[in-house]
Image (spheres, rainbow, N blue to C red):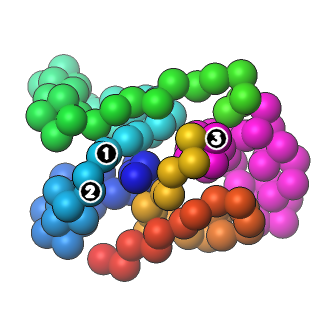
Protein backbone atom coordinates (compact mmCIF):
# COMPACT_ATOMS: atom_id res chain seq x y z
CA UNK A 1 0.00 0.00 0.00
CA UNK A 2 1.22 3.50 -0.87
CA UNK A 3 0.54 6.25 1.62
CA UNK A 4 -0.13 9.80 0.48
CA UNK A 5 1.67 12.70 2.15
CA UNK A 6 -1.38 13.62 4.22
CA UNK A 7 -1.25 10.24 5.98
CA UNK A 8 2.19 11.01 7.39
CA UNK A 9 0.93 14.39 8.54
CA UNK A 10 -2.01 12.71 10.33
CA UNK A 11 0.47 10.47 12.14
CA UNK A 12 2.70 13.42 13.04
CA UNK A 13 -0.35 15.15 14.53
CA UNK A 14 -1.02 12.14 16.73
CA UNK A 15 -3.94 10.57 14.85
CA UNK A 16 -3.99 7.02 16.25
CA UNK A 17 -6.30 5.79 13.48
CA UNK A 18 -3.76 6.80 10.81
CA UNK A 19 -0.90 5.29 12.82
CA UNK A 20 -2.80 2.02 13.26
CA UNK A 21 -3.53 1.86 9.53
CA UNK A 22 0.15 2.30 8.70
CA UNK A 23 1.17 -0.19 11.36
CA UNK A 24 -1.27 -2.80 10.02
CA UNK A 25 0.01 -2.56 6.44
CA UNK A 26 1.93 -5.67 5.45
CA UNK A 27 4.18 -3.69 3.11
CA UNK A 28 4.56 0.08 3.27
CA UNK A 29 5.43 2.27 0.30
CA UNK A 30 5.65 5.95 -0.48
CA UNK A 31 6.38 7.84 -3.65
CA UNK A 32 9.61 9.76 -3.86
CA UNK A 33 7.27 12.76 -4.36
CA UNK A 34 5.77 12.19 -0.90
CA UNK A 35 9.23 11.83 0.60
CA UNK A 36 10.29 15.16 -0.95
CA UNK A 37 7.09 16.85 0.28
CA UNK A 38 7.71 15.63 3.81
CA UNK A 39 11.31 16.85 3.79
CA UNK A 40 10.28 20.15 2.22
CA UNK A 41 7.86 20.84 5.08
CA UNK A 42 10.52 20.24 7.74
CA UNK A 43 11.59 23.38 9.53
CA UNK A 44 15.05 22.24 10.59
CA UNK A 45 17.61 19.41 10.35
CA UNK A 46 16.19 17.69 13.42
CA UNK A 47 12.83 17.32 11.68
CA UNK A 48 14.66 15.99 8.59
CA UNK A 49 16.27 13.33 10.77
CA UNK A 50 12.91 12.47 12.39
CA UNK A 51 11.29 11.97 8.98
CA UNK A 52 14.17 9.83 7.72
CA UNK A 53 14.17 7.78 10.93
CA UNK A 54 10.39 7.22 10.73
CA UNK A 55 10.66 6.02 7.11
CA UNK A 56 13.52 3.67 8.01
CA UNK A 57 12.14 2.40 11.35
CA UNK A 58 8.79 1.45 9.83
CA UNK A 59 10.38 -0.17 6.77
CA UNK A 60 8.86 2.06 4.14
CA UNK A 61 10.08 1.52 0.60
CA UNK A 62 10.52 4.74 -1.37
CA UNK A 63 9.39 4.18 -4.95
CA UNK A 64 11.42 6.16 -7.49
CA UNK A 65 10.21 8.42 -10.25
CA UNK A 66 10.55 6.42 -13.47
CA UNK A 67 10.02 7.42 -17.06
CA UNK A 68 6.67 5.57 -17.12
CA UNK A 69 5.52 7.28 -13.91
CA UNK A 70 6.51 10.66 -15.32
CA UNK A 71 4.63 10.02 -18.54
CA UNK A 72 1.52 8.79 -16.73
CA UNK A 73 1.62 11.79 -14.36
CA UNK A 74 1.74 14.11 -17.39
CA UNK A 75 -1.33 12.37 -18.83
CA UNK A 76 -3.14 12.78 -15.49
CA UNK A 77 -2.40 16.51 -15.37
CA UNK A 78 -3.60 16.89 -18.96
CA UNK A 79 -6.77 14.89 -18.31
CA UNK A 80 -7.70 16.05 -14.81
CA UNK A 81 -5.84 19.30 -14.16
CA UNK A 82 -8.58 21.61 -15.38
CA UNK A 83 -11.60 19.56 -14.32
CA UNK A 84 -10.53 18.52 -10.82
CA UNK A 85 -7.47 20.61 -10.07
CA UNK A 86 -4.93 17.79 -10.13
CA UNK A 87 -1.47 19.23 -9.58
CA UNK A 88 1.89 17.74 -10.52
CA UNK A 89 2.66 16.34 -7.05
CA UNK A 90 -0.64 14.47 -6.76
CA UNK A 91 -0.30 13.26 -10.34
CA UNK A 92 3.14 11.78 -9.58
CA UNK A 93 1.82 10.07 -6.44
CA UNK A 94 -1.20 8.64 -8.30
CA UNK A 95 0.99 7.53 -11.22
CA UNK A 96 3.42 5.85 -8.81
CA UNK A 97 0.59 3.85 -7.26
CA UNK A 98 -0.91 2.92 -10.62
CA UNK A 99 2.39 1.97 -12.27
CA UNK A 100 3.28 -0.25 -9.31
CA UNK A 101 -0.18 -1.83 -9.08
CA UNK A 102 -0.62 -0.69 -5.48
CA UNK A 103 -3.56 0.92 -3.69
CA UNK A 104 -3.14 4.53 -2.53
CA UNK A 105 -4.39 5.57 0.90
CA UNK A 106 -5.29 9.24 1.31
CA UNK A 107 -7.82 11.48 3.02
CA UNK A 108 -7.33 14.01 0.23
CA UNK A 109 -9.56 12.31 -2.31
CA UNK A 110 -10.71 15.29 -4.36
CA UNK A 111 -7.80 15.15 -6.79
CA UNK A 112 -7.46 11.37 -6.91
CA UNK A 113 -11.09 10.29 -7.45
CA UNK A 114 -11.20 10.98 -11.21
CA UNK A 115 -8.32 8.56 -11.89
CA UNK A 116 -10.27 5.45 -12.88
CA UNK A 117 -7.35 3.01 -12.86
CA UNK A 118 -6.22 4.09 -9.38
CA UNK A 119 -7.27 1.90 -6.46
CA UNK A 120 -7.99 4.58 -3.87
CA UNK A 121 -8.43 3.72 -0.20
CA UNK A 122 -10.17 6.66 1.45
CA UNK A 123 -8.98 7.49 4.97
CA UNK A 124 -11.45 9.28 7.21
CA UNK A 125 -9.74 10.76 10.24
Q: Are marks 1 and 3 in contact (CB under 8 Å)?
A: no
| Mark carried by residue 25 | 2
Taking 114 as reference, is 90 left or right?
A: left
Taking 1 as reference, is 58 left or right?
A: left
| Mark 2 to mark 3 CA distance (whole Å) | 19 Å
Taking 1 as reference, is 78 left or right?
A: right
Q: Are marks 2 and 3 in contact (CB under 8 Å)?
A: no
Residue 91 drawn at (x, y percent): 67, 46
**Residue lying at 46% horizontally and 73% vertically, measured from the top left:** 122
Mark 1 highlights which residue? Answer: 28
Residue 68 drawn at (x, y percent): 73, 29
Depth check: 101 or 57 in front? 101
Q: Are marks 1 and 2 in contact (CB under 8 Å)?
A: yes
Q: Range of the magenta residues?
A: 71-99
Mark 2 Cα within 10 Å, few/some/many (few <14, many 20+)?
few
Mark 3 Cα within 10 Å, few/some/many (few <14, many 20+)?
some
**Residue lying at 79% horizontally and 47% vertically, measured from the top left:** 77
| Mark 1 to mark 2 CA distance (whole Å) | 6 Å
| Mark carried by residue 99 | 3
The quarter of the image holding the C terminus is: bottom left
Residue 85 part of the magenta segment: yes
**Residue lying at 46% horizontally and 30% vertically, measured from the top left:** 63
Residue 48, by quadrant, is: top left
Secondary structure under the numbered disc 2 in the rendered image: loop
Depth check: 103 or 93 in front? 103
Residue 21, by quadrant, is: bottom left
Amino acid sequence: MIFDTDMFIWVQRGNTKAAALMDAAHKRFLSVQTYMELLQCAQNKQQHRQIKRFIADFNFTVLPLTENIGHRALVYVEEYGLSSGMRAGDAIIAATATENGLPLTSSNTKHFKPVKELELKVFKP
